[in-house]
Amino acid sequence: MVRQMKKILVVEDEEHIRKLIKMYLEKSGFKVIEANDGNAALRSFEQEKPHLIILDLMLPFISGEEVAREIRKSSNIPILMLTAKADEENRVQGLEIGADDYVVKPFSPRELVLRVKNILKRSYPDEQEIKIKNLEIIPKEMRVLKDGKEIQLTTREFRVLFALAKKSPAVLSREEIMDEIYDEYDEVVYDRTIDAYIKNLRKKLDDDPKNPRYIESVYGAGYRMLK
């Protein structure tokens, strides 16, 4: 059980699935806001300020992918996507647009609640902030500042950066990075997933992989944060 009531925005056009998710979340102590299409999702996000969004990919009017892209312009709120597609390419694409986690339909409501709790628990790790070069990483607030200006990261992107920063200058393999950001009940994760996070981080930090300032690729070993 979470220590305080958190607000979860559930965006799903199929009412029976939405109500099922709502029932299980409310039993676990969460406040649930419902939206049945992309437009309603964006309105609820602005008005309700939820702590996490459960977002179906296939929505009327505006797709789940477009909703995620729009939200990522201004917020790093955790997004858990619901999808009927389980292939690796689809997952990587979703992660690249800002999803923090995936649940494939049909799913276990209990597992969904566990994932929600885990994401919320790990979104605000209780560690000291880290300063590397012109970056300031603030784990308690899940914020990253570059030259004093905030960089918008997804929850998983933040965890990858924080994992590399706190172990810097050690090299972390993809498997070690996975251990830092995933739990035992997460589904199979591919190397390309970690590579997608690194690619996104480099883009947002304006870091040239051929001449890296922050994240260096170590051939055959993994990645490390340069001090």
Image (spheres, rainbow, N blue to C red):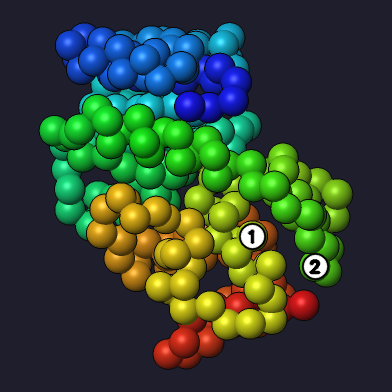
* In front of the other: 38 or 190: 190
Amino acid type indicated by mark 1: Phe
- Classed neighbour count for the residue bearing mark 2: other residues with Cα under 10 Å, few (<14), some (14–19), many (≥20): some
Image side of residue 40 versus residue 104, left or right = right
Q: Is residue 35 left or right of residue 198?
A: left
| Residue 209, horizontal then vertical, whole percent | 58, 76
* Residue linked to disc 2: 132
Q: Which amino acid type is shown beneath numbered disc 2? A: Ile
Q: Position of residue 53 (x, y in %)?
A: 44, 26
Q: Secondary structure at mark 2?
A: strand
Going 43% across and 64% down the picture, which residue do you hit? 178
Query: CB of mark 1 within 8 Å of CB of mark 2?
Result: no
Residue at 17% across / 43% down in the picture?
85
Residue topped by disc 1 = 162
Where residue 35 sits in the image (x, y, percent)? 37, 11
| Residue drawn at point x = 31 percent, y = 42 percent | 102
Q: Is residue 61 above or below residue 108?
A: above
User: In front of the other: label 1 or label 2?
Assistant: 1
Point 44% across, 64% down: residue: 179
Indicate left or right for 139 with 41 as reference. Answer: right
Lower position in the chain sequence, tag 1 or tag 2: 2
Res. 139 visible in picture: yes
The one of 110 and 10 positioned closer to us in this rendering: 110
